[in-house]
Image (tube, helix red, strand yellow):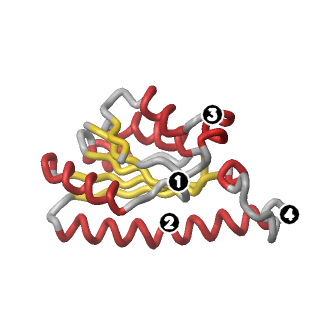
Amino acid sequence: MRRLHEGAAKEMEGCVMLALSTFRKSREAEDTAIDKARQVGKLFIAYVADLNLARYYIGTDPRPSFLESGNEERLLLEHVEAGSDHLKGISARAKREGLKVGTYIESGRFAVVCLDIVKEIKPSQIVTTRSHRPDWARSFFGSPVDELIAKAGCPVIVV
């Protein structure tokens, strides 16, 4: 994993962290994070392009098959690009609110990437949302948000 510049990590200590991903994003989570960040003056936005795409496409139409050679990598790149655009929009909005903003985007496993970031920036709280997978899939595969809640070491608000 790429590490944040040490100075940047120190500057963001105590911030509110907004944890988003390909399948975990909502305007309500963004609004909540910005509202909470006003109290501390800092917002860090982490965006993860989910590596485990198959977990989210269960029960959907398999055409076209993203699992064919090369399609998954292309799809991940598209998700990183879309995530980058999304980050820019949220970041600009937060800056207009007078907040200090840090951002990070990476392809990976949501909980793993977020927990690595938590170790570096030591947020005061995290705001996130859940994906909209079927309950049976969440039970079978587990929940990255539940893992984040269990291991973050700070309050996690799920909206």
Quadrant including the N terminus: top right
Percent position of residue 153, x then y:
36, 27
Mark with earlier residue (2, 4) = 4
* Position above or below: 6 against 73: above
**Residue beneath label 4, please?**
68
Mark with earlier residue (2, 1) = 1
Residue in view at x 64 percent, y 67 percent: 77
Identified by mark 1, the residue type is Val
Identified by mark 3, the residue type is Ser
Q: Secondary structure at mark 1?
A: strand
Residue in view at x 72 percent, y 52 percent: 58
Q: Secondary structure at mark 2?
A: helix
Q: CA distance from mark 1 to mark 3?
A: 21 Å
Q: Residues within 10 Å of mark 3 (few under 14, many from 20)?
A: few
* Position above or below: 25 against 2: below
**Residue beneath label 3, please?**
139
- Circles 3 and 4, Cβ within 8 Å, touching? The answer is no
**Front disc: 3 or 2:** 3
Percent position of residue 28, x then y:
32, 58
* Position above or below: 113 against 69: above
Q: Residues within 10 Å of mark 1 (few under 14, many from 20)?
A: many
Between residue 24 and residue 126, name the one nearer to us.
Answer: 24
**Residue beneath label 2, please?**
83
- Circles 2 and 1, Cβ within 8 Å, touching? The answer is yes
